[in-house]
Image: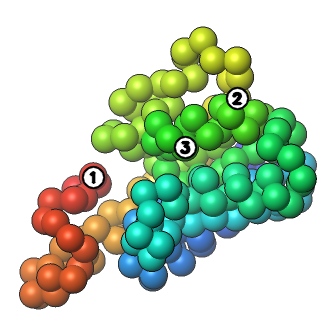
Amino acid sequence: MEQLEKDEKYMRLALALAHEAALAGEVPVGAVVTRGDEVVACGRNRREQDKNALCHAELEAIDAACRKLGGWRLWECTLYVTLEPCPMCTGAVINARLKRLVFGAYDPKAGSCGSVANLFTLPYNHHPLVVPGILAEDCAAELKRFFKDLRKQRAAGNVAAWKKPGISRFD
């Protein structure tokens, strides 16, 4: 199987996790860690559920991969994530020594792999291979659908539909 086919296969798995997050009322971001052809770990956003700013899909997947593989160095692994990582998650990619980062949609408000900033251009001791834009339209569509539904809920008077108006980064 060619690399692009593999990247799309694992991004589809990350998209399924993002959809699962959306169904749970979370911003739909999913992440998958692979080593070779093996799925090592998965994660999805759980910030609302856990009431914790650290519960990003990437961190959940990296944490699970470290536990499964028995170490913090994921130098043989690839992280697939549906949305360009934020500064915190980009830092986790660097610290985990991930070999590759593959992401779907760019994040023009918080993306730290090229959109707002590119932390990988700084003189850190590790720089993964970054592959942006895999299934970008599908990844962006999942986010847009989520925020469109959220706005409809708010308009219908469901104040519990998240906390503040105007939270969408994907209008």
Q: Is 11 on the left-hand or right-hand side of 96?
A: left
Amino acid type at mark 3: Cys
- Cα separation, mark 3 vs mark 1, equals 18 Å
Q: Percent x, y for residue 36?
A: 90, 49
Q: Is 72 on the left-hand or right-hand side of 58?
A: right
- Mark seen at residue 89: 3
Front-most of residues 101 and 135 = 101
Of label 2 and label 3, which has the lower sequence position? 3
Q: Can the viewer see residue 112 in this picture?
A: yes
- Cα separation, mark 2 vs mark 3, equals 13 Å
The quarter holding residue 33 reads bottom right
Q: Residue at x 57, y 35 (%)?
A: 91
Q: Residue at x 60, y 72 (%)?
A: 16
- Cα separation, mark 2 vs mark 1, equals 26 Å
Of label 2 and label 1, which has the lower sequence position? 2
Instruction: Please tell me whether mark 3 sits on a helix, a strand or a loop.
Output: helix
Instruction: Please tell me whether mark 2 sits on a helix, a strand or a loop.
Output: loop
Front-most of residues 36 and 9 = 36
Q: Nearer the viewer, mark 3 or mark 1?
A: 3
- Mark seen at residue 29: none
Q: Residue at x 39, y 78 (%)?
A: 25
Front-most of residues 154 and 91 = 91
Amino acid type at mark 1: Arg
Of label 3 and label 1, which has the lower sequence position? 3
Which quarter of the image is occupied by the C terminus?
A: bottom left
- Mark seen at residue 128: 2
**Which residue is under mark 1?**
169
Q: Percent x, y for residue 144?
A: 33, 63
